[in-house]
Structures are given as C-alpha cells and as structure tokens.
Amino acid sequence: MDAAVEEGVDILSLSIGGPSLPFHSDVIPIGAFRAIQKGIFVSCSAGNYGPNKTTLSNEAPWILTVGASTIDRNIRSTAILGNKEKYDGESLFQPSDFPSTLLPLIYAGVNNPNSASCEEGSLNNTNVKGKVVLCERSESIGPVDQGQIVKNAGGAAMILMNQEIEGYSTFANAHVLPATHVSYAAGVNIKEYINSTSNPMATLLFKGTVIGIKTAPMVTCFSSRGPNYASPGILKPDIIGPGVSILAAWDVPVDNKTRTRSTFNVISGTSMSCPHLAGIVALLKSAHPDWSPAALKSAIMTTADLVNLNQNPIIDERMLPANIFATGSGHVNPSKANDPGLIYDIKPEDYIPYLCGLNYTDQEVGLITRSIVKCAEVGSIREAELNYPSFAIALGSTDQTYTRTVTNVGPANSFYGSFIVHPPGVTVTLDPDTLEFSGKNQKMTYKVTFRRCRSASPQKTYVEGFLAWIPVNSKYAVKSPISVNLV
C-alpha cells in the first residue's frame, strides 16, 4: 500500500481482509490512513463471513467498507422433477446436449447423512451412475469440486442445495458436469419428493442468461455483517454493491480449451463488490477532482438506494427485509452519487481525536498516523461525534446529542427540509430542522438529539431508522442511516 501511495495512485481497491483487530494492530487501516492523508481513496471488502453478525473486516471509518449484493442477471438452470415441479437455480456451465428425458434422481446422503455433501470418498458405497445426484453445500469443499466427485462416481448431473443459513442465495459456477445450484427451500422440497416415491426422476433444463430479476439487489448470504466490533460507534458496512456472479478476469481457462484466450470466470464475493465501488469512485473523482476521500465516500453513502427493482425494501438471503448491518447506507447509485447536494467531509487530522476517544495510547495512535500524537493535547471525541454520514450509538436513559457539518455542493441557493424515520422506541430531533444555503461550498452545522421513549423495549436490542435532508425541489435526498443499540 505504501508503494502504491508513493507511485501516486488515485484509488486503492483491496479485496482482502482478516478478522477484526484494533486499528493499530491491522496493517490495512494503517496503510489506508497513509493513503487518505495523500488524498487517495481506499475501498475494501467487508468480508465473506456472513450472514452471522459482527463478522466484518476493514472497519476503520477512513475506509469504504463494501458488502455484496446480487445483480438482476441469472445464468439459469432449472431442475425438473418427475412430479412436474420445477425449481430454478444457476450454473455457468450450460450444455446444449443434455437430454430432456427424465433420469433417476438420488440423494447423496441416502445411505449415510455424512455423505450428503458429496466430499471425497463419500459416494464410494452409493450407486450414482447415470443419475442426477442431490448434494448439499459444504464449507469444507467447493461446489465445483463437489461436481467433480459426482462426475468421477459416474453421476450424470448434480443438483446442489443450500444449507439452511444460506437461504435463497445461489451462484453461477463453472461446473464440470450439468448442474444447478438451488435454494435451501427448493432442496427441502426435492428431498421430500425423493422420499415420497420409489422411483424419483429428474432432469435439468438450461435457459442461459435471464435478465430482469426483480429481487435485485439482494444482500447475499456470505456478505459480512455488522455491528462494527473494532469501533461500535461507526456504522459498518458503509455500502453494498454488485458482488454475486460477476464476470471477472481469471488466470486459467475454465472451458477446458487449453489454447483459449478467454481466461475469464464468473466469481462471487465482496472481492467483486469492492472493485465495483473503486471503479465508481474513479468516475466520481474524474468529475469532482477537488473532493476529498471522505467527500467521495459521503456522496456514495447519502445517495444509496434502499429499495430493489420491485420498489420494495432491499431483502437478504431469507427473502426478508435486510437490516442496517447488512446494507449499511444501502445499494450504490452512481448517477445520484455524482450530484449528492450535500456532503459530510472529514479531514485526516479529524480522525486523531476519534482515535484518542477509542482509548488508544499515544503510541498506538502514532502507529496509525505515523506521527507523534499526544491525546492529552489534541483531546478526544466519542465515536459518534466524528462527522460521519451515518449514526451508530448506544442509548440508555440519558439523551445524547451530536453535531454534523454538511457542505453544499449543489446549487448555491438551496433550501433543505428534513425528514426522519425514527428508530422504534427512539425520538430523533434536529436543530435546526431546515438548512438554507446561499453559496456553493458553504458549510452549515446541525445538532441531532436521540431520546429513548418510555415505550422502548426494556431488553437490549438494536433498532434502526434514518434522517434525510430534502430540498424544496426534491431533487436530492441526503440520507443518513441510524443504528441505535438500546442498552
């Protein structure tokens, strides 16, 4: 990272990350801080350890932490059962000569539940020759390798079903045999069909690329979730972007043609969504070369979409509304980010009181800033006092008030009203509740107060909402998500 900074790059895209660590013990936030000191934007993967909570990587506020969502394209393969039921799934391998006639269908775990995941040696005592084999996904073996084991055992095709925790998230893989990857619910139904008849049958129908999936963007099962463990007062992830079944450069051919020049694959992961955001930042930085990394980040976060193509709230792998720890600010909208109206800016030196507020020692803060820091002199602030485009607070019986400063990057003469979706059990008030600008790049500061209602749940729980600044012409909606931990 230091070498890239010295070479004068504009943006760093890091599709890597590890477990949550204090920032002074993690090389990525240390390297990223040097980058933002030089005006270089840093986009990082949120991690692929979802859907469990508190599984994020790259949680520092000077980093854009990117989760993964689906796109509106499937590479469709459909399982057709002997009872005429059909279950849509996905596969990158789309053979044109697979027979439409029904073949015997068998569950890999029919003789031994431990064989259900189709791992090495698991099918030795099961006759799968010429059959469609139903396998269960496993953390210990990849889906393509599962297909290879089915193929080696003589299987004609594979239906790969999710684990329950993976829900409805499916992926297009470059399988080595005819296959389809289906949801957990579909897999349960297929198992029930197998158990209901003495002669279960199935085939696969390959439909190629299907465009216009209305549930997109959907948060995928593997996308790591908040809350932020390293700094609970900073809401993470920041944003979600395309990260499922993405066409990507690859080091070897996946079509078994040794002389092909088409060394591409279709890959899923936050390693795919992170560079999407880096590319979007490149476009924004070209249009706004004077914007700081924090300003670019603010523009992306405050203009993010909260609904899918059906105009319903973004859902997750359960087909239920995704929470704020899955989506962050929402799904990136590049066009809106190019004209955000207002931005929340942060200078590199503004992070120093924040770091001191994390109770880091002077030496630990100095490791990050690569300078001599004396917290007793610079002072400290609470995490939520950082001029961040979102809010994450722990709220007890005492009211909490924070300030935010916004910069007008829209029309010189602008008037903004406010709109608040209060987190359940919490009252949010703004002072002032309107903002009137008379010049470009003019700054205005407002206060936001959080008060726990008497009706709030007495149990410790997280609730969420958002506040938005909306101009008279409704051209913009400068949104800030709010996460409140009721303690």
Image (cartoon, rainbow, N blue to C red):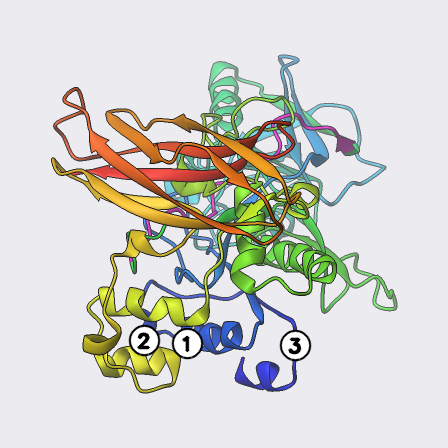
Secondary structure of the residue carrying numbered label 2: helix
User: Where residue 7 sits: x, y (%)?
Assistant: 65, 85
Q: In the rendered image, is residue 256 in sight?
A: yes
Amino acid type, label 3 = Val
Residue 261 relative to residue 448: left or right: right
Residue 168 at x, y = what percent? 52, 31
- Magenta-span inclusion, residue 218: yes
N-terminal of the two: label 3 or label 1? 3
Residue type (three-letter) at the residue carrying disc 1: Ile
Position of residue 186 relative to residue 11, above or below, is above
Label 3 sits on a secondary structure element that is loop
To which residue does mark 3 refer?
9
**Residue beneath the point at 66% across and 46% down:** 245
Separation of residues labelled 3 and 1 (CA atoms): 17 Å
Q: Do labels 2 and 1 touch, CB within 8 Å?
A: yes
Pointer 3 local density, CA inside 10 Å: few below 14, some 14–19, many at least 20: some
Q: Which residues are magenta?
A: 210-229
* CA distance for labels 2 and 1: 7 Å
Q: Which mark is residue 30?
A: 1
| Residue that carries the numbered disc 2 in the rendered image | 24
